[in-house]
Image (cartoon, rainbow, N blue to C red):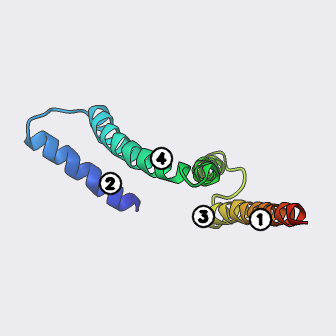
């Protein structure tokens, strides 16, 4: 993955130089990540608007999952940099599975509570 990113970076740098744009690495970061970010924003915004019609829980899940993903990888990278602990991809995967397991448990409890309330109202 890192090799692919490096190749794309080199290609963008080379194309910008050939076009005579004289952009620095920082300038390219502004344009590339600005473009990726705004396109991603519009896609996510459209998706969240559709999801909000059904349930805010889905939006909360996606947001929490995304934040947790960043935190998990930040911790793994920090372990590598500081030498405290071991940076392992398996740790990151297990951490995410933990969240998925706990969230699934939450949904099961929520469904049981919903049907329990519905059953009680029926009597």
Q: Residue 42, percent across and down? A: 37, 44
Determine whether label 1 and label 3 are within 8 Å by CB: no
Q: Residue 79, percent across and down? A: 66, 50
- State the quadrant of the N terminus: bottom left
* Mark 1 or 2, nearer chain start: 2
Position above or below: 70 against 34: below
* Mark 4 or 3, nearer chain start: 4
Question: Quadrant of residue 109 in the image?
Answer: bottom right
10 Å crowding of disc 1: few (<14), some (14-19), many (20+): few
Q: Which mark is residue 6?
A: 2
Gap between marks 2 and 3, in whole Å? Answer: 21 Å
Gap between marks 1 and 3, in whole Å? Answer: 33 Å
Q: Which residue position is annotated with label 3?
A: 89
* Mark 1 or 3, nearer chain start: 3
Is label 4 or label 3 in front? 4
Could you say which is closer to the camera, residue 91 or residue 116? 116
Q: Secondary structure at mark 1?
A: helix
Q: Which residue position is annotated with label 4?
A: 49
Question: Quadrant of residue 26 in the image?
Answer: top left
- State the quadrant of the C terminus: bottom right
Gap between marks 4 and 3, in whole Å? Answer: 33 Å
Is label 1 or label 2 in front? 1
Q: Which mark is residue 111?
A: 1
Position above or below: 24 against 115: above
Q: Secondary structure at mark 3?
A: helix
10 Å crowding of disc 4: few (<14), some (14-19), many (20+): few
Identify the residue shown where x is 44% and y is 44%.
Answer: 45
10 Å crowding of disc 2: few (<14), some (14-19), many (20+): few
Gap between marks 2 and 4, in whole Å? Answer: 35 Å
Could you say which is closer to the camera, residue 43 or residue 121? 121
Q: Residue 61, percent across and down? A: 63, 53
């Amino acid at each position: 993955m890192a090799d692919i990113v490096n190749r794309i970076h080199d290609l963008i740098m080379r194309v910008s130089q050939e076009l005579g744009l004289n952009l620095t690495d920082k300038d390219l970061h502004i344009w590339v990540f600005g473009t990726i970010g705004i396109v991603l924003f519009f896609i996510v915004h459209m998706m969240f608007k559709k999801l909000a019609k059904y349930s805010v829980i889905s939006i909360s899940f996606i947001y929490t999952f995304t934040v947790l993903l960043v935190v998990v990888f930040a911790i793994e990278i920090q372990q590598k940099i500081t030498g405290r602990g071991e940076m392992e991809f398996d740790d990151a995967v297990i951490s995410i599975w933990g969240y998925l397991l706990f969230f699934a448990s939450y949904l099961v409890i929520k469904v049981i509570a919903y049907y329990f309330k519905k059953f009680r109202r029926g009597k």
